Image: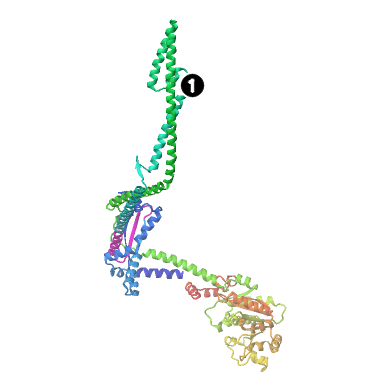
Amino acid sequence: MLITAIIMLLALLITLLSKPVYRATATLQIERESSKVVNIDNILGSGDIRDTRDFYQTQFELIRSRALASQVITKLKLEEKLASTSIMGQIKAWFSTPDTNSQQTALEDLLLDNLTVEPVKNSRLVAISYTSSDPAQAAEIANAVVDTFKDMNTGRRLSATTDASEYLTKTVQETKALLDESEQRLNQYARDHGIFQLDGEESTTSALALKQLSEELIKIQKQRIEQESRYEILTDKNRSLSDRINVLEKKDAAYFQTMEQRLDKLKAQQQKQSIANLAREITKLENDIEIEVTAKRDSLKGELETTKRKESMIRDGITKAKTEAMQEQDTTIAYSTLKREVTTNQELYQNLQQRLKEINIAGGVVANNIAIIDQAQIPLKKFKPNLSTNLLFGGLLGLLLGISAAFMREFLDDMVKDINALERATQLPVLGVMAETSDANSRQLATATISKPRSAIAEAFRSLRTSLRFTHQGDDTPIIFITSASPNEGKTTTASNLACAYASAGNRVLLVDADLRNPSLHKTLGIHAQHGLANYLAGALDSRELIQTTDIPNLYLLTAGSLPDDPAELLSSPHMRALLESAKQNFDQIILDGPPVLGLADALILASQASATLLTVRAEHTRMVMLENALIRLRRAQAPLAGILLNRVDLHSGYGDDYGGYVYQAEEQRAKPSAMSKWLTALKKL
């Protein structure tokens, strides 16, 4: 709660002391592609962006680019205004260097730090905002950013068409030169090798001759086949005269058909009239016809022989032409290669010419895909600081930090707090709980069992006395050793109050101050003695002369005396055992107030000579690690551990509810702390 209150107070102070900041916002519409006035997508590459997110992210980064920031700063002359209207600008100005480039970079960073680009959800709109302590400047810069971005976009597209036009013009010129060169090589090669065009096709002399001979061969073969067929029919006398006449040429066939018709008439007359003259005339006509047919057959045979010789000559010519054509094949292939090169150059030249015309037309009609929807207006309300938001954030941050600090403190704190955890860790019973008292000094606290018999402290020590009696019922004169893991844990107060508790019950009690390094019982009980236990152990005095009476009935004190150089050696001497044996005969209870366990051997020596060892533990002060180490040392020394006294416990915190919940009414009314004292106690513990 303290951390939360501090954080909220800091948030309130920062909010009240902060300079008000205003935000002006302009709205842009960014289309993925501009309107296609002329279809030049393949030229300008407007369709290259396949992912819409990549496209819009690119546009956002262009808006936040240094090039745009530099143009806005130059356009609005913001060199001095920008730094004066921004807290960050003033801070950077203090540490800036006189270098011009560094100052320009700092101004660009300052402008970009206050510039925000946010897409409007589910739309193609983009909100561009600028924050400044000057509302008019915020609107001016926001509008300048959107105008500059639109102009830069248009300039980039025009620059793209210009660059493409220049590049295509240069490429067209280079391609035209290549085309002219390839055409010249083709023509020169055709002239050198006698290649010419025939019906749109390129041919050589041998190829043309081969073509013509092939055509003539086909004709002569057809003529030969016809002549052989006619000759075969004319030679076959088994055929009728009509069949043989029909194969003759038309002019000859007409003559023979006339003679055949005459022959048929004569034969018809002969059948009607048996005239001898008609028979002779028929025979003569038949012989004439046969002679004529034979003559035509012989003539046809001569023509057939001529045709065969001509066919043979044509075949020889074809063979020769083929040989020459094979020799000219490499020339034809090379010519075809040159011709394909010319064709490729022509197509490339025509395509580039077409693209150049298109891009020249598009250069003046490129449409912008950026549209300004709303200009930024001068804001009337401040954007930040927002008191409610800052307080809410401060409260949440304070709660988070406070809870984290509490958990961290609890996690790192291994001090003794819980009685059950203490018993589990030490495997020893907690014989008593002594309440925390803030209204008494050390001397008053040492005899609180006698001076305040109805207090929680008195009740705690009487309860401790009862618990200890159960631990040494068979011992006539028990020796109880009081120690602790570390200093300032209340072992001396415990020893004196426990001695008072035994004395108030009618027992003769000897309280021995065995802390020969830092004795304090003589101070707390108000007894001044120059000689004590150390002097006796050194063999200088008799113990009966050193034991002194106190103001408390039945309570006797043996002070520490003069501080020796080696307390451990004295405590382990036979004189110490003799002292304890002698005291058992004169007293009902012997209580030893010894030094702490850790770092000293004194406590281990005294624990080995006692019949019960009581370990005092200060609540919320003694660390569990130190306590465990002290118990390990005592157990190694085979000390008779009786239990633990939990000292200086705040009974209202919940640690001592099981031990101090029932007290006298008057004491409860007087000892009950107020809410303010609880708060002060909690703050002290922090």
Q: Residues within 10 Å of mark 1 (few under 14, many from 20)?
A: few
* 586 up-or-down from 26: above or below: below
Give residue 285's quadrant in the image: top left
* Quadrant of res 294: top left
Mark 1, secondary structure of its residue: loop
Is residue 380 rendered to the left or right of residue 388?
left
Nearer to us in this view, 368 or 265: 265
Which residues are the magenta region? 120-149
| Residue at position x 63%, y 70% in the image | 424
Nearer to the camera, 464 or 618? 618
Residue 62: horizontal and vertical position, in percent?
35, 60
Residue 684 vs residue 575: left or right? left
Q: Is residue 284 left or right of residue 495?
A: left
Confirm whether residue 247 shows in the render: no
- Residue assigned mark 1: 236
As rendered, which of 352 and 406 lies closer to the eye? 352
**Residue 169 to residue 199: above or below:** below
Q: Is residue 132 magenta?
A: yes
Residue 582 percent location from the top left of the image? 71, 88
Q: For the point 40% across and 17% down, which residue is it?
A: 257
Q: Which quarter of the picture shows residue 455?
A: bottom right
Q: Is-magenta flag for residue 240?
A: no
Residue in view at x 53 percent, y 82 percent: 441
The location of residue 415, given as percent across then percent down, is: 56, 74
Regarding residue 339, the answer to whether it shows in the image is yes
Q: Amino acid at mark 1?
A: Asp
